[in-house]
Amino acid sequence: MPKNTGEHGLIFLGRDEKTYGKDGIGDVLYDPEIECGGPEGTPGRQCAFEPTKEHTQGLDLIGREGRKLHVGIASYRDPLCPKTLYNMYTKAEKPDDIHVRVLQQNDPEVDVDCFKEYCHLMSMRDIEGDDTEKDEKDYLDSCPYKDQIFIHDIHAKEAAGPTWARGLISKDLEEAHRQQSLSAQDHCMSLDSHMDFEDEWDRKMIHMWDEAKNEYAVLSTYVTDVVHLGHEEDAEVPHLCMVTFTSNVRTHATKSATNLSKPKLTNAVWGAGLSFSKCHAELKVMVDPHTPQVFDGEEFNRAARFWTHGYDIYTPNRVYVLHDYHKSQSNPVTRTWSNNGKVHGSFQDSNFRLKTMIDMPGGEEDSQKALRLKQTKFGLGDRRSLDQLIQFSGIDLRGMKPSIDGKNRCGNIQWVPFEEHQNGVNYIPKFDEETEDPLEPYLPGSVWYTSENEKLDASEEREGLPIINLEEKHSILRAEIEEEIQPSGDLAAKHAELREEIADVDKKNTLTEDLAAKLTASPNNNTPVAQNKLLRVGKKVEGFLVEHHFVPPEQHGFGQLPFIVQCSVFTLVVGLIIAIVRSAGTGRVFIRNDRKRAL
């Protein structure tokens, strides 16, 4: 008897009663309202950010009008790559909108060339029963959509694993964006090189993404096998929500969901076999190219980076892209890239980097070095924190356990709010090309905004003095100074006795060159007072200190004071400067740390 899937569909949680208890196994009805915190009227209800005109830069809120579709494919010695391109273009509703980048890692002596064979297949499609050999030049010159296909060739001996390969595709997308042939508002899809497609798959994928109603949505899963091609009405889809721990953290198998009414929010588990989003997601969360030789750990690392950048992973509610598991996995050269050893770096270094990024044991133990890595170009995002990710996903990364609390998060879960970047969703942060450190300060709303202060406080290499917040501190400092310099009764009497002596003092009396230098230079002896906000306080205080009510205006000035008073004032000013410098660490620090040393 068919199960009741309810109005919005049914989610299979699994059978692992040992980990998740009786309440965490079996099936549960899908309730999309829980993603917002409850139905309309629920206190604190908050849904994901639906696309607005501010997001879309004036384009329609939904649909493909004005948007290209960019597809990235990493292919390693795969004879199915040409067929994937053929299926993609021949089954698309609007093939003219589709631009493909293939990272081809082949041995040209023995492997099928993806582009040439694709062109050959396209030349044969309308000729039934004609086995005549076509001239290669002819079918390459007339190859449909050839100007929309870019092949990035790498010799198979240079291959260093899927993450390294996808990282090169990311760089190609970045370059296309720099050349303005790719927009942040275009659609982007990454997938494997052995795929097939339902008819009009492009229109259906874009419509499905729109149905998520989230500008930050990323559709992803381990897609169905090609044996199910043409059975999209089955409405059962693979659903990623669990991991296992090996040398790193690995996306673990799939659960399933049936008859979903819309894409379902997941607990941030992502699969590399299919990823569909707006291109601003691919541009901000580029694949980390510094992880050669990695297989386990690739997917959850990027999932963590997507989520902390504000992106949400959704299980598609229908399958329009399918995977040829049998033929691809029976290919005897599929994993021979691992024979290349340390051609672009070692597995140990890559694993160390990935573990550092998500606080797993075996990563960097120096907290400042780890923080700096997380803030680099291929690090974590600054919209949500790693602690929030652990709570949301339910995965105990620090303890290397599949659950932090025994609760199953494959079912209904609530979206985690964040503050959108002040410069908008299409803004791509800038990083130093060599060090990969951020080039711009963190703004309010960033999870690093306060952490930046702590990082600067702990730094051993500061360039100049920090700038303190005068609005917060000046009134307190002024009150303290005023109280400290109030003349006592004895000092007032002494002033009366010294009035005659003050009148006879040489008006040209000045400080020694050594004392003058100390008063006009910053404590590090290389920053002029006029360029140092901290010492600007000293200049204002200096003027305040010489406002003696009993001295005629024409006799104002430091040089009119007796030598003993000059020394007293000098001592007070130096003490004040030292006090301000020592208290600067308690103020809000706004300068960014420009250190260049590597981890």
Image (cartoon, rainbow, N blue to C red):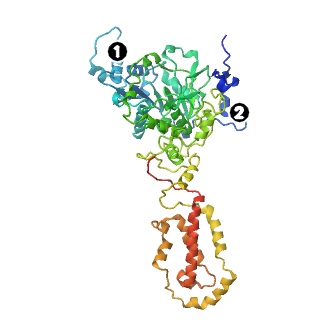
What kind of residue is marked 2? Glu
Helix, strand or loop at label 2? It is loop
Residue 278 percent across, percent down from the top left:
50, 33
Q: Which dot marks residue 486?
A: none
Residue 188 percent across, percent down from the top left:
47, 31
Helix, strand or loop at label 1? It is helix
Q: Categorize mark 2 by other alpha carbons within 10 Å: few (<14), some (14-19), many (20+).
A: few
Q: Residue at x 37, y 25 (%)?
A: 145
Query: Visible in this render: residue 449?
Result: no
Q: Where's the N terminus, which quadrant?
A: top right
Q: What residue did someone put label 1 on?
A: 124
Q: Residue at x 54, y 68 (%)?
A: 536
Horizontally, is 586 left or right of 65 in the view? right
Task: Identify the image quadrant of residue 577.
Answer: bottom right
Q: Nearer the viewer, residue 52 or 42?
A: 42
Residue 453 percent across, percent down from the top left:
56, 53
What kind of residue is marked 1? Met
Residue 36 percent across, percent down from the top left:
66, 33
Instruction: Please say if the residues under marks 1 and 2 sit with CB atoms less than 8 Å apart.
Output: no
The correct choice, above or below, for 334 with respect to 46 in the image is above
Q: Nearer the viewer, residue 412 or 83?
A: 412
The correct choice, above or below, for 402 with respect to 573 in the image is above
The correct choice, above or below, for 188 with respect to 479 in the image is above
Q: CA distance from mark 1 to mark 2?
A: 56 Å
Q: What residue did someone put label 2 on?
A: 40
